[in-house]
Every structure is written in structure tokens, then in C-alpha cells.
Amino acid sequence: MIGMRRVLFYLTQVGVLVALAVWLSDHPGKVEINWLGYRIETYFGVLVLVLAILLILTSACYRFWRSLLGAPQKFLSQRHGRKREDGYRALALGMAAVAAGDRDEAKRLAHRADTLLRDPELTRLLSAQAASLNGDKVAAQRYFTALVDNPDTAFLGLTGLMRQAIADGDEERTLELANKAHKIRPGSSAVVDVLFDLQTRCADWVNAQATLFDAVRRDVKTEKQAIGHRAAIFTARAYDAEFEERSKEAGEFCEKALAAVRGYVPAATLRAKTLAREGKQRRAARLLEDLWQHNPHPDLVVAYVNLWSSEPPLENLRRLQQLVRQNTQHTESRIALARTALEAGLWGEARRNLTGVPVADQSVRYCRLMARLEEEETMDSGGPNARHWWERADAAPQDPCWNCESCGAVTPGWFALCGNCGAFDTITWKRAPRVWTLALVPKPGDVIEGKSLETELETVPTEEISNSNPSGDRQAS
């Protein structure tokens, strides 16, 4: 369409010139000029042609003169443009070198970009990243601090300083910088993760809860990701309130945790305790009984029995039968009844419950109970049947326990924070890995399936090593 318009415009110009030439030829008037003693006579058309030629020559001379005057400036402008283009290319390649971890190339390109662009606002981030990559903390901090002073780059500077503080292990400084960065850009998932992690590690549950709520509202975290953390925070606040003897507040936090995650065992057991303290044993019992139908757990047994303290084992057995009545075939139900029956001296009842446990669920705990049953029923601690079950316990699958998903540490109960690595909401109920004894003990430095012996031993929890000792197992039972 544009090409057609140009053709039409060109044809129009040609037509106008042709029409003008025809008109002048049809009207060949004469022109006489007397100037400085000279007398010139010519046709009007010739005069128009001469004037047109003079106009064209004057315009050409003017353009040539302008180009001569502007040549130095044009040369400098083109040279500056090439330098900026090369500078931007060096800046882009420098960022790529930082991402690839090429320290020397990043440093070289940062210097080149700074030399070519001569614009600190553009090259400061690359210079900071290159200095950080090369281990020059002083220079990196200087560049990042300069970025913070500019409102347009303040967030980048704060995140850079925050990474430095994390590398230095300065949690207080990291928290301060994360708070500032979060105020500037609350939708940054990286900043939210760092801020939430530090708030939980410091047990700052109120601010951690606010950060989590804001993250969900801004779609930084999904509701599915946040729901477990929310229950853990409410439960942690409940335990803090219980420790400070604020029983009513502890109960309220437990209710909120159970509303977030139905059947959350740590919250349910504490809620039962607070209800019992208020004299509401029946309500506490119903809470645990309802939960047992869907999620049988050993901690629920302890909490249920503690509702009626100082009762004999036989009465505890009667009450536990009430607890498990809706889920009697579950392994946890059978184990709980068998253990209490053993304590009450009801060996037949204990054997009946243990016999119903599936082979796949015959774990260390099951084998120990069977060994105790054989010893107490026969009044012979060294009998062949008891010895058989003690030996089977050594090779039986581990029982589920509270352990950290982050570092693997085994804990005696649920905690919001891992006592070993400090991670939040990583204590879960699952089986710990089984550790087997090697037939031949290798020398230090020997490689076992791609790992040295020292590395392999460092990954073995102390509690698991002690469980491999038969005598230790017998004493623990």
C-alpha cells in the first residue's frame, strides 16, 4: 500500500512538471533585464529553468557546507554509539559469565563494560556480582551499598547484601536486610522464603504467620504449600502458651491448627491435655477417638491414657478398647492393646492382638513385644522362643518415628523446629532408614558405593547405631 502511494506521488510530480513545461511552451513570453549596463533578453521558460538550476546548486552547496561543519560531531557521535553498543554487549556477556560462574571472564567483562559505558548505574550490579564471585567481599559490599542508595536499584543492592550476610552466617543482619527488601518488593519469592525461614528459626511466630498470610495473598505461595506451615505455626504458638501456663490460649491455637489440618496429631494431643485440665475429659476423649478412626498414632494412645491418670493397667486396657473400637484391625490398635495387656498380665489377650498383626508390619517394636510376651508368659528370659524374637528384632524393619526430613535427625517427639539443623516444619512421622553392619570393616578412606567410609559414617544417626545392639534393644524394651 505504501509503495503504491509513492508511485502515485512520483507520477503526480512528473505530471505537474510536464504540464508546466507544456504551458510554458504554449505561452513563450519574453523577458528583458537591464542591469549594470548589461541588457539580457530571453524567453520566460529559459529564465525559469536557469533559476531552478541556481536554486539546486545553492541547496547542494549549503548541504555540503553543513556536512563539513558537522563531520567532527558526527564522527564522535558514531564512535560513542559504537562504544555504547560494545559496552552493552560486554554487560550482557558479563551477566552470562556471572550466571555460569566464570570468575575471570566476569571480572574482565565488568571492567570492559565500565570503561566503555562510563555509567556506574548500569555497570554497578555486574561489578558487584563479579567482585562477589571472585571473593572480594569488600568491593562487592561497596558496589551493593551504592546500589541501595539509588531507589531504582535498591532492591538489587539489598538482595546482594542479603546473600553476603547469609554466606557470613549473620542471621540478624540477614533478617534486617530481608525485611527492607520485602517492603520494596513483597512479591519476590526469594525474599519471602529467606524472611519466612529466618522468622521461623527465631521462633518469631507472629511475624512468620503475617509473612505467610501475605505470601498466599500475593500468590507467592499456594494455599496447598501454606496450609501445613500454618498448622505448624499455630501448634508452636500453642506449645509456647502451654509452657507459659496460658492454657486457654493454648487450646485456642490448637483449635486453629486442627481447623487448618484436620487430624494434626501434635495439636490434637495438646488440645486433649488442655481440655482435660478444664475438666472436659469426655470431650477430649471424643477428639482422640474421632482422630483414631482416620489417623491411628502412638502419641494418641499416650494422650488418651493420660486423660485418666493413676489408673491400673487393666482399666487402661478397657479405656483403650474404647479408643480403638472404630479401627480395631489397624496395626497401631493391636500394638496398643497388646502392650497394655502385657502390663496388665493378660498374656492371652496380648498374644491374640499380636497374632493379628500382618507380617509386613512386624517391625522392631512388634518383635520386642513378642519377646517380652514369651519371657513373661514362660517366666524364662533365656527361652528359645524369646531368644528367637530378640534375634528377629535385629533384622526387623524400623518403626515409624519423629525425624527431620531435612537432616534425618531422630527426635523424641514433634517440634516446630529441628533441634539439629533448625529447619522449620520438617519433623514428620515416618520410618527412619535401617543401617546394616558390614561383613568386613573397610579401612578409612575406602570407597563404599561412591562414598568414603568417613562420609558414610557421618550420615548414620547415633540412635540407629545403638539400635543394632541386641542387648541394647532388650534393655530398651
Image: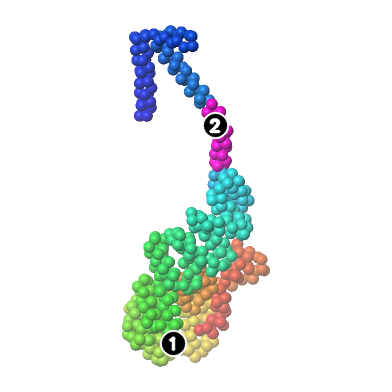
Q: Is residue 405 left or right of residue 458?
A: left
- Mark 2: few, some, or many residues within 10 Å (few <14, many ≥20)? few
Q: Is residue 232 magenta?
A: no
Q: Where is residue 377 drawn, in percent x and y?
A: 46, 89
Residue type for callout 2: Gly
Task: State how the image is colored.
Answer: rainbow
Q: Residue at x 53, y 71 (%)?
A: 421
Q: Where is residue 425 drawn, in percent x and y?
A: 46, 70
Find out whether the residues at labels 2 and 1 contact each other: C-beta distance under 8 Å.
no
Q: Is residue 68 left or right of residue 320?
A: right
Q: Residue at x 46, y 17 (%)?
A: 53
- Mark 1: few, some, or many residues within 10 Å (few <14, many ≥20)? many
Q: Residue at x 48, y 67 (%)?
A: 197
Residue type for callout 1: Leu
Q: Rounded to the nearest whole Å, what is the CA distance between mark 2 and mark 1?
A: 105 Å
Where, by quadrant of the figure, is residue 272 drawn?
bottom left
Tell me which secondary structure the magenta stretch mostly adopts.
Answer: helix
Q: Is residue 352 visible?
A: no
Question: What residue would you read off at disc 1?
Answer: 342
Question: What residue would you read off at disc 2?
Answer: 70
Q: Where is residue 403 drawn, in percent x and y?
A: 49, 73
Q: How many marks?
A: 2
Q: Is residue 477 left or right of residue 298?
A: right
Q: Is residue 76 magenta?
A: yes
Judge whether 446 appears above or below 308 on screen.
Answer: above
- Check the picture and name the quadrant holding the N terminus: top left
Bounds of the magenta segment: 65-86
Near-viewer residue (196 or 281): 196
Q: Secondary structure at mark 2?
A: helix
Q: Residue at x 59, y 72 (%)?
A: 437
Q: Where is residue 224 drawn, in percent x and y?
A: 39, 64
